[in-house]
Amino acid sequence: MLHKVNLDEVSDGKVYERRDMVRLGCGDCEGCSECCKTVGDSIVLDPYDYAMLAAELSMDAAGLNSKYASFGPVGAMVLPHLVIDEGKGCRLLSADGRCTVHKARPGMCRLFPLARIYEEDRVTYIHQIHECPKKPNKKVRVEEFIGIPNMVAYERYLLVWDSFRKAYEGIVTPEISNEDLEEQTKFILTLFYLTPFPVTKGADGVVDMEPFYSAFYRRMDTAYEGLGLVRVPDKEVEDWKHKPIRKTWLED
């Protein structure tokens, strides 16, 4: 998410939606993995990313956390991020600098050099023109560049997850005790990360994330209730077409 950024300084000055064409293509990053070596701990994993990686690597949370993910503070929450070894880069890179989980790479990896902007009822994108050393030479549709199946469902999920994070930040005040904060952190991590989601990897090697959404919304109801959060009414529910969504999320 971007805060108080002058778009003209970091981008081409335009804001894109998923169906828009952007000059991003550069030969599938052939011969380059610079961004996978210099990102530090900035590749934060949301529940979708974490579930997808666990399925792709055939690992449970313990295995994933012992090798590829580490937990740290992100705003008011504690969330996992990819481990990047100094001087070597992401642990998911092959010896020749290629991503070994490209089909299941995290959302922030898919975006680069785009960045997301979370608006009240939609996700938009900007092209960070100074971030990638390669010169793009081909226009591509945003949703094709990101490569997530069912982008409508995915963007809807992103908005709900972002709303939850903002709602949680609203109850984390200096007065909260360390014990309560630890209990809430454990509750969130167990609900959205440490408890496996129903994700499967097909015979073609593609991870099927469709079952993820139904489970995610059920758990989101549990999270709001368990933390005593007030849910902001959704304003774009009429455009939501993903049928397994919890009915309670359509009746605000």
Image (tube, grey):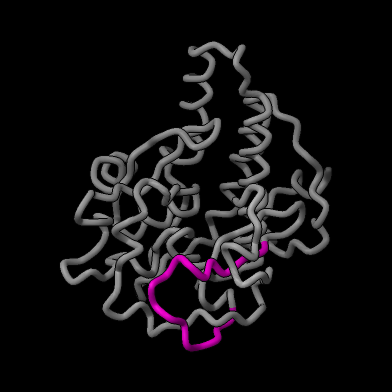
Q: Does residue 201 lie above or below 159 as drawn?
A: below
Q: Quadrant of residue 15?
A: bottom right
Q: Residue at x 64, y 60 (%)?
A: 155
State the image coordinates of residue 62 (x, y, percent, origin top left).
29, 39
Q: In the image, 164: left or right of 197?
A: right
Drawn side of residue 4 relative to residue 108, left or right: right
Identify which residue is drawn at 56% across, 61% down: 115
Residue projecting furthest to the bottom = 138
Left or right of residue 47: residue 235:
right
Q: Which residues are magenta?
A: 124-141
Residue 134 included in the magenta stretch of the image: yes
Can you say which quadrant of the picture contains the C terminus? top right
Q: Picture coordinates of residue 121 (x, y %)?
A: 76, 55
The picture places residue 68, in percent across and down from the top left corner, at: 28, 48
Q: Relative to 90, is 113 above or below?
A: below
Q: Residue at x 35, y 71 (%)?
A: 205
180 is within the stretch colored magenta: no
Specify the quadrant of the image occupied by residue 200. bottom left
In the rendered image, the residue lying farthest to the left is: 95
Toward the viewer: 214 or 227? 227
Q: Residue at x 53, y 57 (%)?
A: 211
- Is 137 drawn above or below residue 144 in the view shown? below
